[in-house]
Amino acid sequence: MLPDWVKRQVVILKQATDLHTSSLSQSLTYHYLESGRLAGQIDLIREAYKHKCQILCQHIESELGEHLTFHKPMGGMFLWAKFKYEMNTTEWLKKTLNNGVVYVPGEFFYCNEPDHATLRMSYVSVTDENLKEAVARLKASL
């Protein structure tokens, strides 16, 4: 909570920064896009994500295959999984956090009738070794 006299100034500042992207950011983006390097960078990112996805899928299949089912992503940044039995992944998150692993419970992505046995895992910002370790920690949290 802020005093009213400060809150008003913060609101004005926030509104001013939300009006548009800074001129410097716009200029940098323009020059980067003009350089023609974006397509090559996207190819590199796609290959890196594909590799990480394969690593995560491999470890989930070998370590958690009796517990989880999932479809191998054909792209993107996330792997969706579902427990083969009744499990509340929001409650389970408390245990996994204690073991140093975080995911997003799938129930929060449903409009109606959430499936509490689902979860979404990101693999894009984690090293191969940490993906392996994360799956081991998930298993230890069961």
Image (cartoon, rainbow, N blue to C red):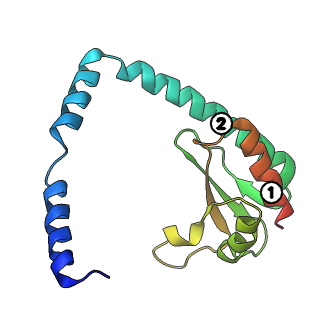
Q: Is residue 57 visible?
A: no
> Could you tell me which residue is drawn at 78 percent across and 40 percent down?
58
Identify the image quadrant of residue 90.
bottom right
Is 55 positioned to the left or the right of 74 in the image? Answer: right
How far across and down, in percent of the image, does residue 6 sit?
Answer: 20, 76
- In the figure, is residue 106 to the left or right of 19? right
How much space separates mark 2 and mark 1, taking CA atoms?
18 Å
Graded by Cα atoms within 10 Å as few (under 14), some (14 to 19) or many (20 or more), the crowding at tag 1 reads: some
Q: Where 126 sits versus 42, above or below?
A: below
Q: What kind of residue is marked 1?
A: Arg
Which residue lies under the disc numbered 2?
52
Q: Quadrant of residue 49?
A: top right
* Residue type at numbered disc 2: Lys
Where does the image place residue 9, in percent across and percent down from the top left? 15, 70
SS label for mark 2: helix
**Which residue appears at 23% of the width and 83% of the height?**
3
| Left or right: residue 81 compared with residue 24 | right
Q: The C terminus is located in which quarter?
A: bottom right
Residue 137: percent from left, percent from top = 80, 57
Quadrant of the image occupied by residue 101 = bottom right
Task: From the viewer's side, name the closer residue of 91 and 61.
Answer: 91
| Residue at disc 1, secondary structure | helix
Q: Give the residue pinned by disc 1.
A: 137
